[in-house]
Every structure is written in structure tokens, then in C-alpha cells.
Image (cartoon, rainbow, N blue to C red):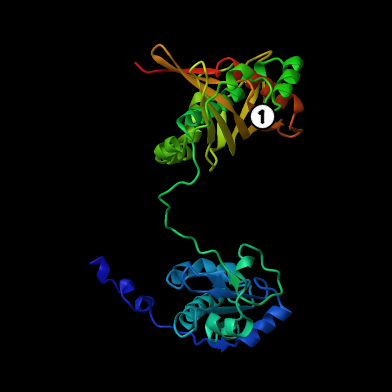
Amino acid sequence: MTDEHPINSKNWWHAYGELNTAVKEMTVDELAGLYSSGTPGVDFVVIDVRRADLSEIIPGAINLPSQSLPATLPSLVHSLSNIKKFIFHCNSCQGRGPRSAGWFADALNKHLDHIGAHNDTKERVYFLKGGINAWKDKFGTGELTARGKAWDGKTLSTIQLYTPSYQISTTMNLSFTVGLLIGQSSVILLLILIIKYFIFSDVDVAIEKKRKKKLKRGEGLDENVYKYKTKYESVEWINSLLSGYYGVYREYLDSNGVEIIEKLLNRRSIPLLDRIEVNNFEIGYKYPQLSNARITEKGECLIDFDYNDQLLVETSSKFIINYPRERLASIPIDISIKLIRFNGCVSMSIEGGYMVVSLHSNYNLILKCQSQLGSKAKLQDIPKLEEIIINNIDNLLTTKFKQFKIKLL
């Protein structure tokens, strides 16, 4: 029975009743005169009542599809009642444009009568003669290269809009591998552990200087290992097999990442720290890149990796002061850590019933840390915090996260 309702028929507008207010037309020249003497949105407003998937629009206009316009009129007339003139249009203004102008005029009449204001609706509400087609004939169509740019306030040609494509590609051009997938998961866990523990660690400046020297590309490699490499092999076949899984993996973390990280961070309570809240988590949109697979004389498989994206975790918490009594005071703290780039080399080998994945010490890790301490007198981007983070990352990567063992049997 729902499909038989008048609003679902071809002449759906009959469901809203007959128009009570006659609306005058305005030519494109008259509208252009308003642009020369006034300001859109202040002195007048142009309302495009075509569907929301339109491809171009008159400069300064707003899009309110005629199908949904009647339902929005109570709020619309209250919001826009101070505007001097309203100009409605569709493609050619043979139907939707004049009809929508009439609906708005009826609603404006009722509003003005209700508040006891002077009723001058006939001099304020118009439809554009010939619609946007007449406007384009007069002033032309804007260049496609101007899409996405703000209107300059002068040019009267129509503005090209981006029309989204809803066709999803079934192929994924960028690649990744299982080793990198594990590596990315490790990076996420690494950032979580940093936020949890870095405030309790001491800063070792000597380690920091040593770490920066290691970050120079190529240093720290064992030349005796690399000189026995075979020719470089492609790993694209692995990337192709795992491309589908990565999409599911990323979609899952986009939906559940904040909740998962927050649970991990608050699994163990810390006396000096209040509950940690994750305000934002972004896993990025790019893919890890794997290249240069080769076998050494020792039977290890070496693979270079490069993850160049922006993985972000933003958290907030409070430092709790428990002396001379519990929760005497608290200091808010906000920390965001962004991973910008992580590259290096991993080796894989079989030892007993395990596959061992190891991270070589010549990795290059680029992080950006932002912090804010306090509520009123705020300290921002404290250098010491970033120094502590770098040292803790180095310790974690060279100890806990240096080697993974995956049981095969």
C-alpha cells in the first residue's frame, strides 16, 4: 500500500496541495544586477532545487532539492526570513523552480503573518526565467580545472562540481605483503605501548645520539650477509594474494580501532594516571611497499620494506596528584603521535618448528609528536616528551619487537 501513496507517483508534488501565492519571474540580467549591487546570502539568495547529484551550480547558490523542500520549510523560513530576495531555479524553470518558489512563498506568508510583520512576499520571492540553462547561455560554464576552488566573488559562469563515482574498483594497484602486515600491526601496538609507558622512563641522551647516527641509510648492515644475496625477486604475487585481506583489515580497524586501543591502554591501571581516552585513531589509506627479496648464504630471506603513510593516535588523560591525599588535584594531558614513515629490512628464516621474522637495526623511523599539558596555563609540544618517545621506541624495537616467532608445527 505504501507504493500507492501520491508522493510515490509521477506527479508527486500534488501530495503537497495547490499553491496559494503567485510568484513572479526574474531574468538572468536582473539576477546579474543583484550580484553587481549586493552580496549572495545577505541581500539575496539563489536556491537550486534540482537533485543533489548536480554537476554544476550558479555561483553562491545553495542546493535544496524540490522533493525534500516542503519538509524543510518551517526551519527554512525562520532561518532566511531576513534575506531581501529569494530566487529559485531548476534546469529550465518549467516546473520544479516555480513550484518550489510557490511553496516557499506560502510558508513565508504564514510566517510573516504569524509574527505580525509587513507581508511583502510578492516582492521578495522569484523564480529564474529559463533556469540555469538560460544562465549558462548568458555567462557560460566554468572550467573543469576550477573544481574544488572557492568562488572568487566576481565570475558569473557556473561552477563545476565534483560528481562522485560510486563504482568501486575491484583491483588494488598498491601492494603489501604478509611481513609488512605484521609489521604494521606491530607499529600500532608500539604506539600504544609508548603512550602507556613513556612518561615513566628516563631520558638517555647518549642512546638518542647513537640512534640518530643509525638512521643514516645503509649504516649498521652486515656486508658479509648482503654480498651473498641472489638476484632480487619480485614479491608481487604475495601482494596480490593478500590485497583483499588488507581492505578488510583496514575497514575493521577504522570501525573498531578506537575501542580496541582504549581497552588495551586501560587494561592495567597506573596510580599516577587517570583513564586514558582515545580521541582519534587513523590507520591511513596507503599500503606498505615490499621490494628486493633475496636469499643469503645462511638461508635467510631478506626483504626491504617502506611504509610511507600517516598513522595517527590521539589520546587524552590526566596526571593525578595523590599527596597528601588521594586525587588531590589533576593535570590534563593530550598527546598525539603520528607515524610518518617507517622503512628498513626484515629477515625471515626457519628455525625448528618456527618461522622467525627479524627487524634489522638499520631501520628508519620518522615520528611527529604533539603534546599539551594543563588546562588554563598550557604547555604545548614539550621537547622532552618527544625525546623520551624516540628513546623508548628505540628500546622497544631493539628488544621486544626485534624478533617474532610464528609456530609452524
Viewer-closest of 344 and 275: 344
Q: Badge 1 local density, few (<14 within 10 Å), some, or many (20+)? A: many
Residue 203 in picture, x, y percent from top left:
72, 17
Residue 79 sits in quarter? bottom right
Q: Where the N terminus falls, by quadrant?
A: bottom left
- Tell me the kind of residue under disc 1: Ile
Residue 58 in picture, x, y percent from top left:
59, 75
Residue 396 visible in rendering: no
User: As displayed, is residue 145 above or below residue 210?
Assistant: below
Q: In this view, does 130 lie to the left or right of 168?
A: right
Q: Residue at x 53, y 76 (%)?
A: 108
User: As displayed, is residue 66 above or below residue 229?
Assistant: below
Residue 325 in picture, x, y percent from top left:
65, 14
Q: Residue furthest left?
A: 1
Q: Which residue is drawn at 53% across and 38% down?
A: 283
Viewer-closest of 40 and 391: 391
Q: In this view, does 365 lie to the left or right of 3?
A: right
Viewer-closest of 75 and 145: 145
Q: Mark 1 = which residue?
A: 333
Q: Which residue is drawn at 45% across and 46% down?
A: 172
Viewer-closest of 386 and 305: 305
